[in-house]
């Protein structure tokens, strides 16, 4: 058809004819980048709707109705190609020619008439980390993105659409490419692509795009009202959607004497009861703060708690009038003085913040006691001097620098 061609049509009477002169002009597509096609400052519709264009990018996701391409890891650089004929693989670099159109307020290339694979097996651009509200913004249409620590707030409906929220707002997760059955209340990291499909939806592509945070619940301590002589057993139930055997999780228990100081680890192991972990924190003269971490290798959950040491049965040993520690702070070498109103036997113990006794001595005194104590081999930090007469107890703090 480079030259004009005459078409002669004969009517049913076999004699009447009409001649048409036909010329076919092959349209030449305008070469545009994905950014050129997508970027807009107006309603969201592309400024090139209805135009015949050619563009290229790396395939980030594909399913039966088409595929998404991206040419940069940034806003305005993702695009959906409506194409029932070609089946690229994720990581293919492709060039396509077709018409720019809008479907349900979503820009796409439709009526694909040109398709070429330029390369294969390419690495994808890193997903852009966004809030659940930001994902729905126009500039991230068709762009590979990721939301983190988003809670499932609405279970899947009849169309397998479920909702998550990271605190910024709701985002619908659709099963157009991959279907996942979530649990309401669980926390997720989700990688996917924003698409206009009967509203704004986020499309994960496979199982690895959805990471569930381990769930730490049912935290208990035993005894519930510990004294300074009690070791405390902490227990918790820990589950994960993807990890059926709880022993395959990495679970740890830490404790310290103040919030944020939980850096001393104790064994925290799964028991004979499914998904229940237990660990024992040594006896402590002070309040205890503890932290549990659980990791499935991809994401980590944290739960914290604390308990107070009950004062029941704890008071000044009978007859103690005063107790003095000097110098304080010190280098581990210091003097302990004690005045009492009666003679008798007393037990002196020094305990570190892990609840370990680093010094112990039984003394006999007749109303006044003075002794030099040397724990200079111990690590610097906070220690507690505990004095008891077998019935009551007095505790003071000493700082080793």
Image (cartoon, rainbow, N blue to C red):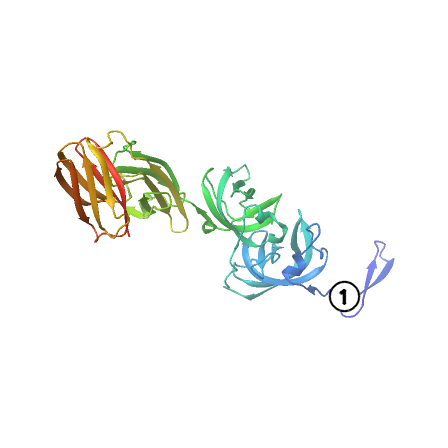
Residue 270 image-quadrant placement: top left
Question: Circle 1 is placed at which residue position?
Answer: 25
Q: Picture quarter containing residue 68?
A: bottom right
**Residue 34 picture location, percent across and down:** 63, 60
347 w.r.t. 49: above or below = above
Q: Residue at x 79, y 70 (%)?
A: 3
Residue under the image location 53 percent in, 40 percent down: 163
Query: Is 395 left or right of 170, judged from the image as shown?
Result: left
**Residue closer to the observer: 328 or 140:** 328
Closest to the observer: 68 or 114?
Answer: 68
| Residue toward you, 190 or 118 | 190
x, y percent for residue 388: 19, 35
Residue 149 percent coordinates (x, y): 47, 45
Residue 215: where, in percent of width, then height? 40, 41
- Residue 229 visible, this orientation: no
SS at circle 1 = loop
Find residue 219 and report its image quarter: top left
Binning the other alpha carbons within 10 Å of mark 1 as few (below 14), some (14 to 19) or many (20 upward) gives few
Residue closest to the far bottom? 3
Q: Horizontal placement of 250 versus 181: left or right? A: left
Residue 199 visible in image: yes
Please name whichever residue, 52 or 335, is drawn nearer the observer in this view of the structure: 335
Q: For the image shown, how many numbered marks are present on the structure?
A: 1
Q: Residue at x 69, y 57 (%)?
A: 99
Q: Is residue 287 left or right of residue 52?
A: left
Furthest toward the top, the residue is 312
Q: Quadrant of the N terminus?
A: bottom right
Q: Measured along the vertical axis of the image, is residue 86 above or below residue 228?
A: below
């Amino acid at each position: 058809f480079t030259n004009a061609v005459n078409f002669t049509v004969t009517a049913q009477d076999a004699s009447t004819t009409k001649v048409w002169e036909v010329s076919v002009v092959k349209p030449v597509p305008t070469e545009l980048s994905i950014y050129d096609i997508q970027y807009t400052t107006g309603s969201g519709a592309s400024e090139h709707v209805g135009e015949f264009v050619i563009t290229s990018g790396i395939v980030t996701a594909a399913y039966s109705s088409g595929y998404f391409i991206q040419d940069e890891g940034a806003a305005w650089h993702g695009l959906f190609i409506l194409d029932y004929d070609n089946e690229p693989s994720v990581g293919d670099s492709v060039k396509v020619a077709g018409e720019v159109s809008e479907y349900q307020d979503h820009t796409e290339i439709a009526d694909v008439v040109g398709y070429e694979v330029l390369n294969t097996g390419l690495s994808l651009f890193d997903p852009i980390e966004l809030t659940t509200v930001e994902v729905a913004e126009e500039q991230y249409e068709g762009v590979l993105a990721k939301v983190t620590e988003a809670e499932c707030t609405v279970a899947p409906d009849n169309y397998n659409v479920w909702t998550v929220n990271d605190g910024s707002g709701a985002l619908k997760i659709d099963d157009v490419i991959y279907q996942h059955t979530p649990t309401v209340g669980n926390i997720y990291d989700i990688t996917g692509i924003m698409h206009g499909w009967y509203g704004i939806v986020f499309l994960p592509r496979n199982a690895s795009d959805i990471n569930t945070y381990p769930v730490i619940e049912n935290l208990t301590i035993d005894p519930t009202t510990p004294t300074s002589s009690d070791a405390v057993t902490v227990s918790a139930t820990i589950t994960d959607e993807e990890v059926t055997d709880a022993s395959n999780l990495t679970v740890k228990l830490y404790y310290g004497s103040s919030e944020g100081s939980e850096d001393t680890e104790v064994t925290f192991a799964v028991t004979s009861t499914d998904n229940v972990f237990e660990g024992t924190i040594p006896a402590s003269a002070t309040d205890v703060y503890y932290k549990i971490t659980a990791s499935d290798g991809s994401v980590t959950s944290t739960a914290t708690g604390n308990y107070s040491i009950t004062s029941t049965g704890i008071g000044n040993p009978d007859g103690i009038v005063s107790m003095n520690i000097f110098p304080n702070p010190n280098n581990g070498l210091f003097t302990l003085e004690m005045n009492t109103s009666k003679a008798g036997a007393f037990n002196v113990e020094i305990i570190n913040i892990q609840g370990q006794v680093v010094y112990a001595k039984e003394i006999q005194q007749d109303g006044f006691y003075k002794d030099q104590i040397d724990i200079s081999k111990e690590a610097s930090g906070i220690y507690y001097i505990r004095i008891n007469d077998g019935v009551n107890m007095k505790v003071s703090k000493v700082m080793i620098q």
